[in-house]
Image: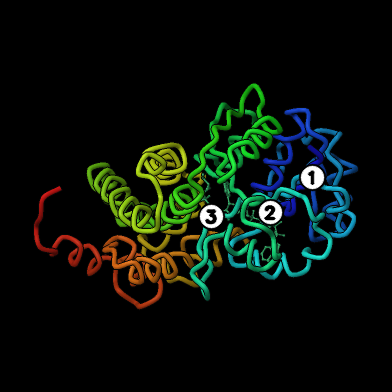
């Protein structure tokens, strides 16, 4: 399955390495020609994964037309809020029978569309050909060859199996799942809950608090998923609880680290400045996931609190008081 990964950030680069090591003919598109040259010459991505040696077979290009030429599988590896604008540029070069998967974990701000819906809308691709790759996959750990599992979500199971074959290695184990909605909601919502965990941890709170946030975060994510047609088992699997636990627990998570800075008292701008250009998707997705929940008539108190802390000036102390001040109820 001739594959191109469109985006040479941390995760795009790690995923391209996995596909090559699974024996798949793989290219990677980098926005900047100098990064493509460095990957080809030095077999390293110095900006995102500086200490990881990339396979010599991985060829990088910086022209979308060249990258997409003849691709049977297109892996979209750019952040969620830039996916539409990138697709608009790639659209005319995507082969008409190619399968497309999204790596991005988010909900589009203006439209409240999931990433697979953005691909269908912006590139005019039949939804049967669109899927996602989502799971507990911190890029640095996967790039280092540490054992990890993930989910390939497609409505069409046969297509999911072909992608699964193209990225199975001795350290990377993809499972298939036909519940694309569940995979996407799990991936988008966990970034928001990881922000909440970071905020709590930055404010000096301990493991009991974090366990409560993770567990109640899963409950509100599952409520939203079910309201949108997801299967609860998906949210109890790798793309749900698996990714939630990895992201909420790891110091490698950009979302958790961003939240920790807010919890320590940084402003949104100060926390943003400390990211070195890396994207913490939950900062924007807290607003779009919250809006999606309101539209679906679902209560998401943690997501609402994260949105208010990030964008409405609510203090961390007031957010905690307001969450604990809610009326008591059965679990
Ligand atoms: N990093 C991880 O551990 C990880 C793991 C799983 C999923 N993801 C998801 O994958 C997606 C990509 O994440 P990443 O970690 O590779 O991000 P990143 O910040 O490391 O890199 C983003 C890449 O997209 C490119 N890009 C193209 N257009 C852009 C634009 N308009 N604005 C910004 N960047 C643009 C950048 O040049 C860069 O190559 C995100 O949705 C993220 O949630 C990341
Ligand atoms: O670094 P984060 O917070 O974007 O999380 C990375 C991955 O999504 C973990 O699965």
Alpha-carbon distance for marks 1 and 3? 23 Å
The label number, if any, that marks residue 205 in the structure image: none
Q: Quadrant of ligand 1?
A: bottom right
Closer mark to the observer between disc 1 and disc 3: 1
Compare marks 1 and 3 and give the one earlier in the sequence: 1
Q: Quadrant of residue 234?
A: top left
Q: Secondary structure at mark 2?
A: strand
What coloring was used for the rendering?
rainbow
Tell which of 87 and 191 is nearer to you: 87
Q: Which mark is residue 105?
A: 3
Query: Between residues 191 and 200, which one lies in front from this camera angle?
Result: 191
Tell me if the residue at label 2 has its CB under 8 Å from ligand 1. Answer: no
Marks 2/3: CA–CA distance: 11 Å
Say left or right for 125 vs 30.
left
Residue 100 image point, x, y percent: 69, 51
**Label 1–label 3 contact, CB within 8 A:** no
Residue 111 in the image, given as x and y percentages of width and height = 52, 73
Q: Is residue 31 above or below residue 307?
A: above
Task: Evaluate whether residue 46 shows in this view.
Answer: no
Q: Which residue is mark 1?
A: 72
Position of residue 283 relative to residue 74, above or below, is: below
**Residue beneath label 2, please?**
76
Dot 2 or dot 3: first in sequence order is 2
Seen at 78% across and 51% down, the residue is: 97
């Amino acid at each position: 399955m001739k594959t191109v990964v469109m985006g040479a950030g941390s995760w795009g680069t790690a995923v391209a390495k996995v596909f090559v090591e699974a024996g798949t003919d793989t290219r990677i598109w980098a926005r900047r020609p100098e990064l493509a040259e460095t990957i080809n010459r030095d077999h390293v991505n110095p900006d995102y994964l500086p200490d990881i040696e990339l396979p010599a077979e991985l060829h990088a290009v910086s022209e979308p037309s060249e990258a997409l030429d003849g691709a049977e599988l297109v892996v979209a590896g750019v952040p969620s809020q830039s996916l539409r604008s990138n697709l608009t540029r790639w659209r005319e070069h995507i082969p008409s029978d190619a399968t497309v998967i999204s790596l991005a974990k988010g909900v589009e701000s203006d439209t409240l569309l999931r990433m697979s819906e953005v691909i269908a809308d912006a590139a005019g691709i039949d939804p049967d050909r669109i899927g996602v790759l989502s799971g507990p996959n911190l890029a640095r750990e996967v790039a280092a060859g540490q054992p990890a599992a993930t989910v390939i979500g497609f409505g069409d199971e046969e297509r999911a199996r072909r992608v699964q074959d193209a990225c199975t290695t001795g350290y990377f184990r993809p499972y298939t799942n036909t519940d694309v909605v569940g995979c996407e909601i799990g991936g988008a919502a966990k970034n928001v809950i990881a922000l909440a965990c970071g905020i709590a941890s930055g404010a000096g709170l301990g493991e009991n608090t974090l366990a409560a946030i993770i567990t109640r975060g899963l409950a509100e994510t599952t409520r939203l998923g079910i309201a949108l047609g997801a299967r609860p088992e998906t949210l109890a699997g790798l793309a749900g609880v698996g990714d939630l636990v990895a992201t909420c627990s790891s110091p490698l998570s950009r979302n958790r680290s961003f939240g920790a800075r807010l919890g320590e008292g940084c402003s949104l701008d100060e926390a943003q400045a400390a990211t070195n250009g890396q994207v913490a998707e939950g900062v924007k997705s807290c607003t779009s996931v919250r809006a999606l929940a309101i539209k679906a008539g679902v209560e998401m108190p943690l997501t609402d609190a994260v949105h208010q802390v990030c964008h409405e000036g609510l203090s961390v102390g007031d957010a905690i008081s307001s969450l604990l001040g809610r009326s008591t109820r059965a679990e």
